[in-house]
Amino acid sequence: MDDRTHRASHRIEGRSAAPGIALGPLVRLTPVKHDARQHRSAAEERQALLDALAASQLALTVLAREAGDADAEAILSFQIALLEDDNLAAPAFARIAAGEAANRAWNAAIDPEIASYDGASDPYFRARASDLRDLRDRVLRHLAGETDQTVPSGVIVAADDMPPSTFLATDWRDGGLVLRRGSPSSHVAILARSRGVPMIVGVDVDHLENGRDALLDGYAGLLIVDPDTEMRAIYRRRRAEQSQVRQAAASFSGPALTATGESVRVMINVTGLAELSDLDPAYVDGIGLMRTEFLFQGREKLPTEEEQYQIYRRMVEWAAGRPVTIRTLDAGGDKPIMGLTQPGDINPFLGVRGVRLSLRHLDVFREQLRALARAAVAGNLKVMIPMVTVPEELDRCRTLLEQALEDLRREGLEAQLPPLGMMVEVPAAALTIEDFNADFFSIGSNDLIQYVAAASRDEPQLADLARPSRAVFGLIRHVVDYAVSSGRETSLCGDLAGDPEQVAALLDHGLRIFSVAPGALGPVKAAIARYTGAAA
Amino acid sequence: MNKLRASVLMRHEVGLHARPSVKLTKLAKAFESHIDLGLSPDGPWVDAKSIVKVMATKAPKDSTIYFRAEGTDAKAALEALVTLVDGDFQDGR
């Protein structure tokens, strides 16, 4: 290969440690040299090491306080704990007493520890060697009177290894990291992933020249030095896509705002606690629909009041003050429950389901209402009744809920009357919404669509009928308008709310509370952010 | 010589790594008693208050951790340490 006329692009393969794309000049960090100290008396050397240890500890403590995330803090607190442990420096002080210089004595004390981690069979423990090297070098720098190494931003840093403390002190905007040592499980890799810094490991950095243009592909574990124009263009495009995706992710974690700055609430639909375990409640405006039928399905005995109470209470606690809307049992239709729904219903979707079923099994319904009233004490719980068709159904539910509260208080159990609202999914209810004594409304678009169109959503041949038509949007507008004029809240919790292509139409119709599957949070928030106002 | 003993199975995903070791030694230091940690009922024993020594055991997941303690608050110390390890170091990672 001849590169006398121009520099041919050069591909170097490593291992991916953190995904992402970076483009920029290479900056090679060289390890600090520490032999240049003058030797003094044993007492002076001892004091020098004590001072260096204390200064290192202080610097790490400050860094840990400023780090602002749990990963960084944990890594630094490990180093601080090592410094606080007299066992670490004891061999060094023994060597100093025997006449050795502080820096050499410190090296001699730490290096066997580093070697022992380097030799560990478990990759996790092996990765800790880097934390110890970092600590060793920090103390050495203090002994040599040097200040901490700084790294410019917007570059691709190449080094043997990078201590977490240097990583944390660096501005990584548009930058990337290439290391010889380190592994995907090293602390610095954990930090790189959590901060979105592309990083690869296992690269022979000795042959990399300072200042050469480079391209880092953290997905493929690839470093390209002197990339050609075509390659640059491809990666610029990929980096632009990457920042778009990151922006979408950022909008996912923040409050939902339209392009004109109007705030919209986006809540989630869930079936149980399992879905909440990976989700930060700060990312959502509450639970817009908790479907309780999944607590009842696939089991031999119906859940007890206590069982239900524990689950509802934990959901409310998870939400930490945000609303949690729990729908009472919506069995029947496509959701049969053993021992409760009647098999062989001629037309299940038009049969005994939802509140119709609950009002015919008062023993089961009362237990659920009791569990809900008890859990309401723990936070912002709301009760929602499904399949309400006429006002009297909701009135009966309200009476039962009030009775349940009275019973609980008489038994000495803590309970509270939660707001009582209704699902709007039967066209008759949507059309006469002003007749219902509900504290809030939630539009169930799946059933509303199939009842309005008289077309099953499970019949593929009728897919073009069972869709959000003008008739459906007309009913949605009617409900939203009434709710606004009467000071009530309306959300929409069907699949319609989770479809990014329908978001603008729903906003046009006045809807300002969406409840969607957790997976649709990002796309729906992104669609809301694109909304510039009702079409003229 | 009156050494109290306790043991507990450690289920933490990656073993006695940095984060759990920091928690364990911090907790041990909160007690006056002398506390040892080992990976077998007969030792070898290391000082449970020293992160250098505790990490050096490189105890993997599913190890049984043995403690022995001597001092005025030995009983409370063992209870607290066993609770910490048994509760997975209150650490979801």
Image: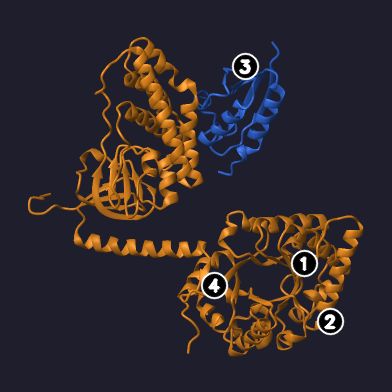
Residue A32: image location, x then y, percent? 28, 32
Residue A411: image location, x then y, percent? 91, 56
Residue for point 60% across, 33% down: B62
Pointers 2 and 3 within a single chain: no
Verify CB contact (< 8 Å) between mark 1 and mark 2.
Answer: no
Q: CA distance from mark 1 to mark 2?
A: 19 Å
Q: Amino acid at mark 1?
A: Pro
Q: Which residue is mark 2?
A: A392
Residue A271: name its quadrant: bottom right
Pick whichever, A487 or A230, lies toward us: A487
Residue A506: image location, x then y, percent? 56, 81
Q: CA distance from mark 4 to mark 1?
A: 26 Å
Which type of secondary structure does the marked residue at label 1 adopt? loop
Q: Amino acid at mark 2?
A: Glu
- Mark in the foreground, 4 or 3: 4
Q: Chain of mark 1?
A: A
- Determine the colour of chain A: orange
Q: Which residue is mark 1?
A: A418
Look at the picture and state if A36 lies above or below A428.
above
- First of labels 2, 4 by sequence position: 4
Which type of secondary structure does the marked residue at label 3 adopt? loop
Q: CA distance from mark 4 to mark 3?
A: 64 Å
The disc placed on residue B42 is: 3
Residue for point 57% across, 17% down: B44
